[in-house]
């Protein structure tokens, strides 16, 4: 096989990026947008020794799991990878991914995993689940103002038909249309990355699903938005509008948001609830993007934590304190640790607006704060919750947790491979994998979130 050859392939597996994998002459081919069960014709784009990349040309016989994507631009848009796969199959694939990682990388014996695995929590309606969208603003080929998403791995804006994304809130579209109409009328220019000229770079839209509150933040390459009062008046007539702000970002950078936020209309934050805990969300706050599944994820973490009201709980990698506050009402006290100072400020504020007084928050690296406080102050924990970024927990965090001997460790993970690595260490050091539940936080993408309960084995 060589470049430009046309081959017929049966897709038998799916790669970590959602691409279909099939074999020709014992050689694996990775084919974007092909799904397990498809028989496809593909064109070789690049060959390595034992594998290659090919482009999907024709679907000769579709997989029974194949369905039409809801978005016309699903293949070009970088947002979803598996929108053309039936949702039940997506869930089965993600559950399988968690199991395989725990079995292979985690060396968890099959009987232990089978007893622990409780399946995957999917969504009843896996569309319109995102409470946040960031649209780049630019011009299309004909020079018309447009908002869209970047095509996968590029900075080329795909103008979205009607500027709608099937994962986002319905309000995104009328908000963007109002902003583009305003820009056209008042000759406000979109930002152009190459020349670093023009004003409006991105529009951030957030919605509190529990409250219906809407936030719009325009990211601008300048100090102020001209005629902002006109735009504010128009946007504020949209039901739920609560906060309209500008964020100044004059850097040549891929970072979307600037550091300064200026309020144009209303408040500089919106309010939302996860369960019965209230959160103030400002344009720069980190906040989970799928609130429906987040409540299920935290509910699972709470259940696994097995709290009676007396426990001391540590919540490592706590962000704005979402899990900490969710657990605090049912614990003796909760200590959160997070590296981003602004997130800790939000966490403390969120504790205050909920009248939660048994949560403490520390700024710093988990791998420094936890060992430091354990060595110096001998802090203890009955339960430790961790929710690390993709790279998982640092070795010293795992070692310190083992020394602290909590009864239970609840591991919330966004990457099954690093989860499996850390589970392996904990299983080798006095903890057993008792319960595993996956939660689908991001339907139509390849990501999967997992919650594991590790319990201390007596006598170890
Ligand atoms: N539990 C939170 C956030 C989880 S995301 C929630 O559910 O909302 C992971 C968090 O870990 C991020 O907020 C990130 O800023 C933080 N983080 C990354 N590296 C860290 C480190 N070394 N120590 C502490 N926190 C870290």
Image: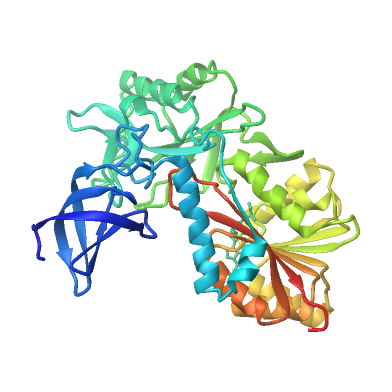
**Is 142 left, or right, of 216 in this rendering?**
left
Q: Residue at x 29, y 42 (%)?
A: 75
Q: Nearer the viewer, residue 118 or 130?
A: 118
Q: Residue at x 51, y 74 (%)?
A: 105
Query: Is residue 328 at all visible to an observer of this figure?
Result: yes
- Residue lying farthest to the right in this orientation: 310
Q: Please, is residue 240 above or below residue 261 in the view?
A: above
Q: Nearer the viewer, residue 460 or 275?
A: 460
Q: Quadrant of the N terminus?
A: bottom left
Q: Quadrant of the C terminus?
A: bottom right
**Is 259 left, or right, of 182 in this rendering?**
right
Q: Residue at x 38, y 20 (%)?
A: 182
Query: Is residue 447 at all visible to an observer of this figure?
Result: no
**In the image, ligand 1 is in what quadrant?**
bottom right
x%, y% of residue 271?
A: 67, 34
x%, y% of residue 155?
A: 28, 47
x%, y% of residue 119?
A: 60, 53
Colour pattern of the rendering: rainbow
Q: Please, is residue 428 above or below residue 330 in the view?
A: below
Q: Nearer the viewer, residue 58 or 79?
A: 58
The picture quadrant where one finds residue 354 is top right
x%, y% of residue 151?
A: 29, 44
Total residue callouts: 0
């Amino acid at each position: 096989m060589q470049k430009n050859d046309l081959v017929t392939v049966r897709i038998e597996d799916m790669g970590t990026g959602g691409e279909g994998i099939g074999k020709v002459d014992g050689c694996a081919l990775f084919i974007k947008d092909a799904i397990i069960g498809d028989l496809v014709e593909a064109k070789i784009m690049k060959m390595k020794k034992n594998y290659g990349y090919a482009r999907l040309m024709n679907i000769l016989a579709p997989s029974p799991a194949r369905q039409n994507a809801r978005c016309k631009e699903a293949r070009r848009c970088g947002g979803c990878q598996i929108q053309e796969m039936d949702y039940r199959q997506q869930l089965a694939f993600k559950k399988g991914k968690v199991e395989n990682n725990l079995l292979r990388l985690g060396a968890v014996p099959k009987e232990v995993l089978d007893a622990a695995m409780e399946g995957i929590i999917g969504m009843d309606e896996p569309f319109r689940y995102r409470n946040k969208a960031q649209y780049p603003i630019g011009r299309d080929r004909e020079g018309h103002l447009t908002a869209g998403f970047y095509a996968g791995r590029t900075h080329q804006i795909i103008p979205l038909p009607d500027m709608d994304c099937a994962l986002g809130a319905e309000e995104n579209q009328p908000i963007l249309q109002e902003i583009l109409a305003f820009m056209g009328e008042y000759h406000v220019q979109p930002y152009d990355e190459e020349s670093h000229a023009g004003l409006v770079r991105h529009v951030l839209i957030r919605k509190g699903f529990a409250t219906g509150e809407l936030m719009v933040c325009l990211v601008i390459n300048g100090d102020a938005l001209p005629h902002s009062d006109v735009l504010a008046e128009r946007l504020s007539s949209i039901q739920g509008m609560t906060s309209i702000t500008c964020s100044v970002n004059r850097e040549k950078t891929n970072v979307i948001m600037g550091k300064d936020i200026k309020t144009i209309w209303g408040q500089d934050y919106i309010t939302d609830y996860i369960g019965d805990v209230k959160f103030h969300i400002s344009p720069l706050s980190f906040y989970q993007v799928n609130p429906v599944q987040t409540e299920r994820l935290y509910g699972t973490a709470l259940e696994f934590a097995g709290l009676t009201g007396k426990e001391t709980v540590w919540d490592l990698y706590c962000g704005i304190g979402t899990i900490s506050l969710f657990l605090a009402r049912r614990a003796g006290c909760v200590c959160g640790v997070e590296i981003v100072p602004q997130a800790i400020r939000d966490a403390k504020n969120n504790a205050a607006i909920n009248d939660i007084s048994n949560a403490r928050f520390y700024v710093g690296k988990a791998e420094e704060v936890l060992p430091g406080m354990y060595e110096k102050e001998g802090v203890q924990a009955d339960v430790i919750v961790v929710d690390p970024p993709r790279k998982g927990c640092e070795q010293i965090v795992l070692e310190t947790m083992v020394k602290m001997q909590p009864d239970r460790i609840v591991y919330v993970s966004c990457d099954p491979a690093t989860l499996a690595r850390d589970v392996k260490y904990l299983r080798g050091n006095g903890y057993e994998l008792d319960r595993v539940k996956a939660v689908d936080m991001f339907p139509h993408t390849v990501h999967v979130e997992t919650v594991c309960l590790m319990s201390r084995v007596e006598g170890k």
